[in-house]
Amino acid sequence: MAVNLLDFDLEGLAAYCESLGEKRFRAVQLYRWIHQRGESDFGKMSDLAKSLRAKLAGAAEVRGLPLISEHRSADGTIKWLFDVGGGNAVESVYIPEEDRGTLCVSSQAGCAVGCRFCSTGHQGFSRNLSTGEIVAQLWFAEHRLRGATGDRVIDNVVMMGMSEPLQNYAALVPA
């Protein structure tokens, strides 16, 4: 299976580039293409050497999450439901406000806490999401919401778990 580059923070991406025999600065270029420009096609990353693009095409990918549904409310709130495999789905919510835009992203599929007052707690816990699955939610929303000018509309990111996000601390930190 190809390596999902969304699983890496900048330092991890630099280490991955080095493992391919490339200089560390290539990670910054790659990071910009993926996270600032929203590009997932290595062939379009014109400032990367053709040899690096070929290596990436054979070993890596920028793998987002399959979108199941999108619901827009009258107040501008948007809810996206993503398939994370194994019969599990997670939700991301964009909340527009006058002075900022907030994106709430899931960090877990299911709930391990099981609070009696919460309906999610009765669903049971399936698994923690990977760093790439968490980042993929932000990546999707950021590039879906950008207008023709490319302006960012997400100013604030809130990590949600269906239970407690810090139970998935190892994946949250690099995300």
Image: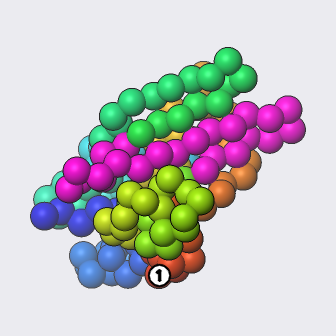
Residue 7 at x, y percent in the picture:
38, 67
Asked whether residue 153 is drawn in magenta, I would say no
Residue located at (34% from left, 48% from top): 89
Magenta range is: 82-104
Direction top: furthest residue: 74
**Residue at the (48%, 62%) spot, across then down:** 121
Task: Report the side of 17 relative to 154 (left or right).
Answer: left
In which quadrant of the rendered image does the N terminus lie? bottom left
Q: Which secondary structure type mostly characterizes the magenta part of the structure?
A: strand
Q: Is residue 84 magenta?
A: yes
Mark yes or no: residue 40 visible: no
- Residue 113 vertical placement versus 120 (above, below): below
Pointer 1 residue: 170
Query: What residue lies at 50% left-to-right and 73% top-to-bottom?
Result: 113
How far across and down, in percent of the image, does residue 130 sit? 37, 68
Nearer to me, 100 or 85:
85
Q: Is residue 88 left or right of residue 116?
A: left
Amino acid at dot 1: Ala
Q: Which residue lies most toward the right here?
A: 99
Tell which of 66 and 128 is nearer to you.
Answer: 128
Q: Residue at x 20, y 56 (%)?
A: 86
